[in-house]
Structure formats: structure tokens, C-alpha cells
Amino acid sequence: MDQFLFQTTMNVIFSFLPVVLLLTFLFLLDSFNLVRVKTLVFSLLFGAVCAIAGYFLNTWFGKWLAIDYSILSRYVGPVIEELLKALVVLYLISRKKIGFIIDGAIYGFAIGTGFSLFENIYFLFNTPADYNLLKWIIRGFGTAIMHGGCTSFFALLFVGGISRSENKLMAALPALLLAILLHSGFNHFMLNPVLQTLLIVVFLPIVFVLVFKYSSSKLQNWLEIEFNSEIEILNMIHRGEFSETKAGMYLKSLKLQFNPEIILDMYCYIDLYLELSIKAKRNLMLKENEFPIIIEPDIQSKLAELAQIRKQIGKLGELALEPLIRMDYRNLWKLNQLT
Amino acid sequence: MNVKITTLPDYTLISVEGRVDTTTSAGLEKTLMESIDGGCTKIILDCSGINYISSSGLRVFLVIQKKMISIKGHFNLCNLQPGIREIFDISGFSSIFSIFPDKEAAMIG
């Protein structure tokens, strides 16, 4: 009994702890505090839901295609599992919960962590007397981290793609393909499983550190360049000097294409957008330095007003305003920082 | 950017002149941190000479404010030029920092 208890404890430790520790490590790397604990917990939970769905789908496909386990785990499983985990990332992106590569990678890793934790719980319950500690070490350090890593890579490539204003489908497909290939490659065990696990443990954190460093400097540049120019333009608007600027002249030139009410709406839109954008970036800076964010009492009504004006301007008006304000994915995400 | 430090018994007066931007903010942060590490718990930052501040500069102010809160010290800003004051007001940073119209008020505050 003692031996069983000891062995089970060791199995639990080795299969759960590494991936949780790596997730904590990634969370701590988030110097801008972009990750929200609530969304992180959501990601973990839905990662587990994906594992449940994956289990049933894999079983069903295995029977339907009448293929053996090795084929299923190498070719079918990776497609199903990566697709399911990617759906959670896509959901988070559709809800504007991910803004940068950093938070995308962490949420992606959390989804993979949730997936592997459920998978390992399932294996623990189904093989209670499995005393092969090495197997659990490989599951914990290798398979679990692989699950987190694959979804993380999908998220960071996808976020990187849509940040460069790529078409969502064109951004998602190569990212998903890479995740599937990595997963499938791992399941092929072309290398010795111990060596494969060792490579993952050594290289994955290094890759994450490098990617996070790059993304942090991009975020810093984005803050620096936009924040200052936005304040400058807003100052000009408040001083009534906007029409003298190039942007103001451009807005004036639109009078030929749009009726005066729309031009007025465009002017209000720029004014309101700049104010909200500056405040959103202020909140990012506050979060970075662990200050509580400021939520102005009128922020919800201003966001509603912005949405209303955006509707009034219409798609054509928005297109005309693109040289001044581009409502791309990151700009929409940024406004989420206000609430 | 030029920084002048005057150490007085009750506080340290730091006068900054020029631009506080990406290239100069690290130097300002180092100077301010050195003062704090040297035992200074009350810093008055005379901003009368600052003619431009970028988000990097604002972040240095946040870092110092955070440090001062942790050591129960004071970080008071004074003599902000109207353009700089407007940046604080527009961005909403005015509520985060203790801003005074002049040195005398900052000493009392």
C-alpha cells in the first residue's frame, strides 16, 4: 500500500508539476501584466474541455476509420486536438482578450496545460498500478509541455499574423499547420523519448524567453510612438489647430465625398478615439507598474458613443479614415483595457 | 537632458531640463533610483525645464512613484509647463501623481 501511495504521488508530481511550473514561469515573464487571471483560468478549464471532446472524437474517428492506435496518435489525434485547442484561442481573440504575442502565447499554453492535465488525470485513473516512473516523467515533461507549446505557437503565430493585418484565415492556417506538425512529429517518437523530452524542456523555455523579449520591445515601441502622437493630435484638436495639420487637411478634403453630418461625426470619432486610446495605453502602463487601472465613470458611455459614431460613419467612412485611424484588431483590443 | 540634484535635510530637489524621451528616460531613472538608494525618502521633481515628455518618461515617473510608495516616501512633481500638465490631464495620470504648482507647495505637500 505504501509503495502504491508513494508511486502514485510521484506519478502525480511528475505528470502535473512541470507543465504548471512552466505556465507559472510564462505568467511571470509577462512584464506588462497583460494576462488576466480570470481568462487564464478560463483557458485552463476549456483546455480540459477540449481534452474530453478530443477523447470522444479520437475514439469515434479511430472506430470509423478502423485504424490502429499508432496511426491515430500520429496523424488523426494531432489534427483533432490542435483544432479543438485552436478553437479556444480563436474564441479568446474574437472576444478581444488577446492583444499581443505575449498574452496569446500564455493563454495558448494554458489551454494546452488544461488539456494535458485532464489527459494525465485520465491516464492516472486508468493505469493506477503503473509504476513506470519514466513514463510519467515523459508524460509530464514531454507530452504535457508539448500540448502547451503547440497551442502557444499557434496563438503567437496567429496573433502575429492578424497584428500585421493579414487575413484571419491566412493567419490561422499556417499557424494551425505548424501546431499539427509539431504535435504529430512528437507523437512519431523519431528520437529516443527521453532525449525528445529533454530537448523540449531545454529549448522551449529559451524560445519563449526570446519571443517574449521581442514582443515586449515591440509593445514598448507601439506604446511610445502612438501615445505621443495621439496626445499631440488631441492637443491640437483641443486648441482648435487640427485643421491646420496634414490630418486636418485630409479630413477637410473628404468634404467632397461625404455629407457635412458624416464629416462632423468623423471629427468626433477621431477626438473620442484618441481620448480613449490614450487612456487605454495609460492603463497598460499602470498595469505594467502594478498600479490599479483607472476606470473613469463615463468610460462605458464614451465607448458606446464611439461604437455609435462608428456605425453612423459606416464602412466607407471608416475606410476613408484609415490613413488617420485604423480600427484594426489591436486597436479594438486596446479599448478593452478601459473596462 | 540636464539633471541637477540639490540635497537638503528634508528632501532632495531634482531639477530636470530638456526632453524626457526614449533616449533620456533611462538616465533619469538611474539618477532618481540612486537618490532613493542613497536614503532619500522625499523627492521633489522640478519639471519647469521639461519641454517634452514621452510615454517612456511617464513610465519612469510611475516606476519612481511605485518605489516611493513601497518605502512610504514622497514623490512630488512641481512647476509643470502647461503643455506637460496637459499630457498628465489628458491621459489621466494627474490622479496618480502628487502635482504641485511650485516648489514651496511641493515641500509642504
Image (cartoon, coloured by chain):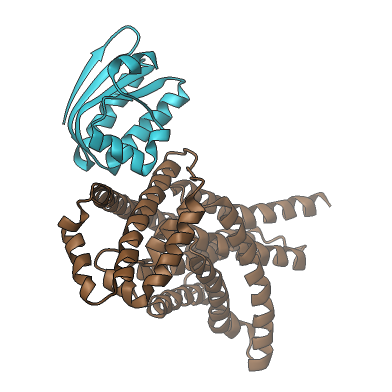
Q: Position of residue A184 (x, y in %)?
A: 50, 77
Query: Given the current orientation, which residue lies at the most extreme bottom position?
Result: A65
Q: Left or right: A115 with respect to A189?
A: right
Q: Up-down: is A289 above or below A187? A: above
Q: Position of residue A20 (x, y in %)?
A: 58, 53
Q: Colour of chain B?
A: cyan
Q: Left or right: B18 with respect to B43?
A: left
Q: Left or right: A227 with respect to B109?
A: left
Q: Up-down: is A321 above or below A225? A: below
Q: Up-down: is A31 above or below A55? A: above
Question: Front-most of A8 and A41?
Answer: A41
Q: Position of residue A10 (x, y in %)?
A: 68, 52
The residue sitting at 60% across, 63% down in the picture is A139
Question: Front-most of B104 and A288?
Answer: B104
Q: Up-down: is A34 above or below A124? A: above
Q: Colour of chain A?
A: brown
The residue sitting at 39% across, 45% down in the picture is A282
Q: Answer whether residue A8 is visible to the viewer in this image.
A: yes
Question: Front-most of A147 and A276?
Answer: A276
Q: Answer whether residue A203 is visible to the viewer in this image.
A: no
Query: Given the current orientation, which residue lies at the most extreme front position?
Result: A260
The residue sitting at 37% across, 54% down in the picture is A277
The picture quadrant where one finds residue A143 is bottom right
The residue sitting at 24% across, 77% down in the picture is A257
Question: Front-most of A61 and A154?
Answer: A154
